[in-house]
Image (cartoon, coloured by chain):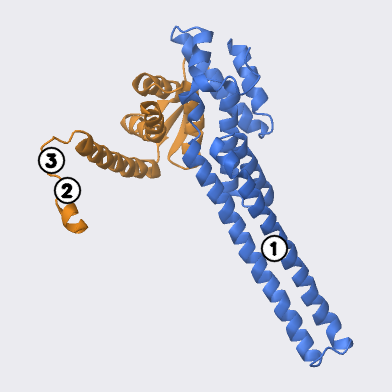
Amino acid sequence: MTRAEFIARLKNGLVGLPTTTANDIVADYETHFEDGLAAGRTEAEVAAALGDPARLARELKAEAGIQRWAQEKNPSAAAAAVFAVLGLGAIDILILLPLLMGVVGTLFGFFIAAIALFFVGGGIMVAGPFVGFPGGPLAAILMGLGLMAGAIFVGALLTIVTVWLVNGLVWFARLHYRLLKPALEPETTPSVTGASA
Amino acid sequence: MPETIEIQLKKGVLGLCVLALLNRADSYAYEIASRLSDAIDMGEGTIYPLMRRMQGDGLVETYLVESSSGPSRKYYRLTEAGRAALAAQSAEWTAFTRAVDAVVAAPDAAPPHQDQPEGAQ
């Protein structure tokens, strides 16, 4: 593989990362080629020693996704981290997938229930006093407030569980993958992708 | 399965090796990669994901050094957290290898499990 081919494949694999991050990574590998050539190696030797650019790109993307999740805890960062980690294609994680889907589905259901409970509470609090709620207006307001507080509590609890779950998945992925596997097992990877030329 | 053990070991100690190298002297990625690929036969490309991770974890930081030939070079150096991580990990590593050595290289004359028959009775 020539240097141009290697860099082209690497860039191809890095699509989706912020441009500055991707440029930074590409510059690192360009420098590596410069240093290798200066040390008297050929482009093909350097490329072979570096390993499969597509797999390296997947690792770098997973790393970037995990780092973003560490910095900003929001749904889009969580999704990016989870998909990047799944993109590594580590078998152990794929086996976990059905279980993960079940857990995600259950969490989603609870979230919807919490939101519904919140609005039911709001409805009872606002409308209860006017439609003759059993126990009188005060009971209606208190019950509505209670339901809303309960819904907020459940929502907060679910958020904590979700953050914990994503952290757990990232931890598991790192433990089993360490973001190093491809170059240590270079022989087993080429058949996976159609990128061999 | 010796191969598997070797891979798992390398995976685990690569970060430790990088920390140890940088503790001796600041270095740049190509140098780290070539020294480690000679020493423990790792793919050179993996150094970049690893360095980015260590930078993200705050174990190393980078600075640019002007070079007379070509563009300036990116050097890595250990942070305080990096030094602490090195101390912790090398202690862990020493304890681990000592324990494994004791088991693997144990002489045949090692005392057998004497309390086991008693416990069974």
The three-letter amino acid code for the residue at tag 3 is Ala
The residue pinned by badge 1 equals A110
Say what secondary structure mark 3 lies in.
Answer: loop
Are tags 3 and 2 found on a single chain? Answer: yes
**Above or below, comparing residue A50 to residue B56 in the picture:** above
The chain painted orange is B
Left/right placement of residue A84 relative to residue A146 reads: left
The residue pinned by badge 3 equals B110
Query: Badge 3: few (under 14), some or many (20 or more) residues near its Cα, within 10 Å?
Result: few
Residues tagged 3 and 1 counted as in contact (Cβ below 8 A): no
Residues tagged 3 and 2 counted as in contact (Cβ below 8 A): no
- Along the line of sight, which residue is nearer the eye, A99 or B30? A99
The three-letter amino acid code for the residue at tag 2 is His
Residues tagged 2 and 1 counted as in contact (Cβ below 8 A): no
**Colour that chain A carries in the picture:** blue
Tell which subunit mark 2 falls on.
B
Query: Badge 2: few (under 14), some or many (20 or more) residues near its Cα, within 10 Å?
Result: few
Residue farthest to the left, as pictured: B109
- Along the line of sight, which residue is nearer the eye, B20 or B93? B93
Q: How many marks?
A: 3
Residue A132, x across and y down, in percent: 87, 90
Please tell me which residue is depicted at 54% across the width and 24% down the height of the picture.
Answer: A28
Left/right placement of residue B52 relative to residue B87 reads: right
Please tell me which residue is depicted at 47% across the width and 42% down the height of the picture.
Answer: B57
Q: CA distance from mark 3 to mark 1?
A: 59 Å
